[in-house]
Amino acid sequence: MSGEFFMPEISAIYLALFIAPFLQEDAAVVGSASAASIHPADAAGIFFVSLLGLVLSDAWKYWAGYYAQAWPPAARWARTPKVAALREAVLGRLAMALLSARFIPGTRIPLYLACGVFRAPFHRFLLLITLTGALYLGATFALFATLGDLVGAQFQHALPFIGAGLVVAFGVSLVLRFIRQRANT
């Protein structure tokens, strides 16, 4: 990490990268990777702050699910046979479920809430979201660094827009596929 950590502009960037996962995780990861590719001297700090934001934004979703059962309709729903079967499937393969959800947009929030509802062991959940978050960030940082080297410095500033466009295109394709599947049933 560079010695510029406490400069106001760098601190503002770090704060934004920490808060961004609470708003939209995939865009936050793309933004972090882009910032790291443009400011390689601060890449380690950007990675750490982004990972901390990812983990805390995921952890609150767990606790939202955990405390949702205080509401009687949610508690009744959680005891239905279908949900009980889903609980066993998720808890029996928690690591694989969390790894899959990390890389499949649109699945994280429901799964993290479900982990809370299902009372997955929080220490295990926290360890797994930290590991999968580090893997996701690391892969994205490496991709952006490689693309930055391939396209050159003149196009490196376009990478965030390309990355954001890819995230949006992927999200739109998922929504369209879901709509088509609903129309065919």
Image (cartoon, grey):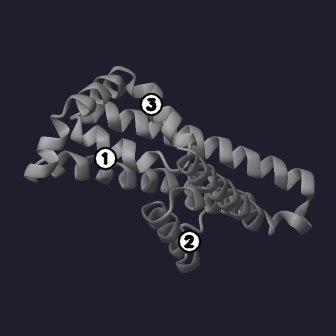
Q: Quadrant of residue 3?
A: bottom right
Who is closer to the viewer here, 114 or 144? 114
Question: Label 2 amino acid?
Answer: Ile
Q: Amino acid at mark 1?
A: Leu
> Which sits in the foreground, 180 or 12?
180
Q: Neighbour class for label 2 at 10 Å: few (<14), some, many (≥20)?
A: some
Q: Label 1's element? A: helix
Number of disc labels: 3
Of residues 113 and 36, the one nearer the viewer is 113
Badge 3 density bin: few <14, some 14–19, many ≥20, Cα 10 Å: some
Percent of width and height locating residue 88? 29, 23
- Of the residues under marks 2 and 3, which one precedes in the sequence? 2
Quadrant where the N terminus is found in the figure: bottom right
Q: Is residue 102 above or below residue 7?
A: above
- Front label number (2 vs 1): 1
Where residue 12 appears, x then y in whole percent? 52, 75
Can you name the residue that lies furthest to the bottom here?
A: 8
Question: Residue 97: which disc?
Answer: 3
Q: Can residue 172 be seen?
A: yes
Q: Residue at x 38, y 34 (%)?
A: 127
x and y percentages locating residue 96 in the rendered image: 47, 26
Task: Tell me which amino acid carries mark 3.
Answer: Ala
Q: Which residue corresponds to mark 1?
A: 113
Q: CA distance from mark 2 to mark 3?
A: 32 Å
Q: Is residue 155 above or below residue 55?
A: below
- Looking at the rendering, which quadrant does residue 120 occupy? top left
Say which residue appears at 63% left-offset and 49% top-offset: 177
Q: Measure the alpha-carbon separation of dots 2 and 1.
A: 29 Å
The residue pinned by badge 2 equals 13
Q: How far apart are the two marked residues, 1 and 3, measured between alpha carbons?
A: 13 Å
**Residue at 43% from the left image edge and 52% from the top image edge:** 52
